Amino acid sequence: MKTIVGGIEQIGYGAELLRNGEVVAFPTETVYGLGADAFNARAVAKIFEAKGRPQDNPLIVHIADPADIGKVAASVPETAVALMEVFSPGPLTLILPKREDLPETTTGGLRTVGIRIPNHPIARALIRAAGCPVAAPSANVSGRISPTEARHVLEDMDGRIPLILDGGCSDIGIESTVLDLSKEVPVVLRPGAITAEMLSVYLGKVVDFKGKVLIAEAPGMKYRHYAPTCACQAARSPEVAAREARRRMEEGARVVIIGSTPFVRACGDLPVIDLGNTPADCMRNVFSAMRNAEKTADLLLLEDFSDRREFYSLQNRLSKSTGGVVLS
Ligand code: AMP
Ligand code: MG
């Protein structure tokens, strides 16, 4: 299959592909998504096939307008309406009971559905033009680093899908916060740019998902994620990163250190990628940095942010890339 990369002029064609049961990659403010008509189980199966994604890993259903939530959710609690008013469109996915007619292929066999309104003009124009809710996970090969640019999608999906809509770099850079409202106490299943602290203002009580996953609540959590093609470890401090980098470079390895501005500045003249100063900058740049670095490096050394609450969501992703290995 030939893969076309197009811009806004291809939105109409993208919508036609979706209506005809094909898959289309499109930009969102979090990461690029690989979409299909959420109500067409055969189309949704093509997403799983293109990604090599396990069947029990549910997809998020994207809608363009709050009024469409009733098309996918069986019931919509008042808290969901209130949260949508504040945070939608934006990087928040709400887990609600699913409608009977929404195929279980879309929800990975679950009775619940994750729903989000993306805040990207191309994503919303595409969904509106298609006229159906669009199921979409990140547009990477399963287990790989999430794509934040059209060229990342092309790396993983060339020849597997008909169309990639290019909408520039994703502004947020990590996936949406997933909040489960189907339980008595709301649970953050996946942290993102919208934090538990921000949500708790509207919910009273909300808990962060913690600990090892035995029975997966968000089935995606049990799979390895965000894995670069080369080795990847975290370093507690710039000193540790620099020492390890020098040791491995003496052995002939090509090493890249990735971290926030103060961290990489403290690494001297070693090869580094600077993610910026703020949590928002680091989230926006991290996946692209890893995809660039893995092309030439044998080892990535990532800054460990685990002691810093404001980098909590970023650290959630990094600890999956490293498999939890931290040098200190
Ligand atoms: P991705 O954004 O590619 O990682 O895929 C969507 C993720 O959303 C899944 O891996 C789950 O973590 C989460 N998700 C989607 N639907 C549900 C659901 N019904 N229940 C729990 N988690 C969900
Ligand atoms: Mg993903």
Image (spheres, grey):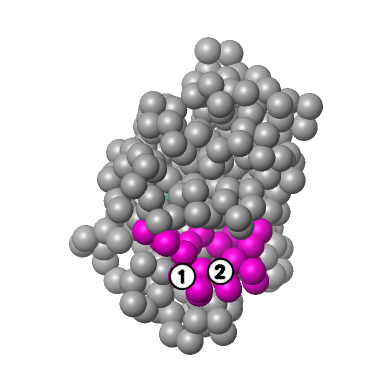
Give the extent of the magenta segment: 75-97
Picture quarter containing residue 311? bottom right
Residue 268 counted in the magenta span: no
Question: Does residue 81 belong to the magenta stretch?
Answer: yes
- Across and down, in percent, residue 211 comes to 29, 71
Q: Is residue 12 left or right of residue 160?
A: right
Foreground pick, 165 / 78: 78
> At which x and y percent is residue 219?
31, 53
Three-letter code, disc 2: Val
Q: Residue at x 50, y 34 (%)?
A: 37
Residue 4: assigned label: none
Secondary structure under the numbered disc 2 in the rendered image:
helix
Q: Are marks 2 and 1 in contact (CB under 8 Å)?
A: yes
Q: In the rendered image, which residue does mark 2 sit on?
A: 81
Query: Along the line of sight, which residue is nearer the eye, 154 or 186?
Result: 186
Is residue 82 at all visible to an observer of this figure?
Answer: yes
Which image quarter: residue 165? top right
> Is disc 2 surrounded by few (<14), some (14 to 19) or many (20+) residues within 10 Å?
few
Q: Is residue 110 above or below residue 139?
A: below
Q: Which mark is residue 77?
A: 1
Residue at 30% across / 38% down in the picture?
55
Residue at x 53%, y 18% (from the top left corner): 159
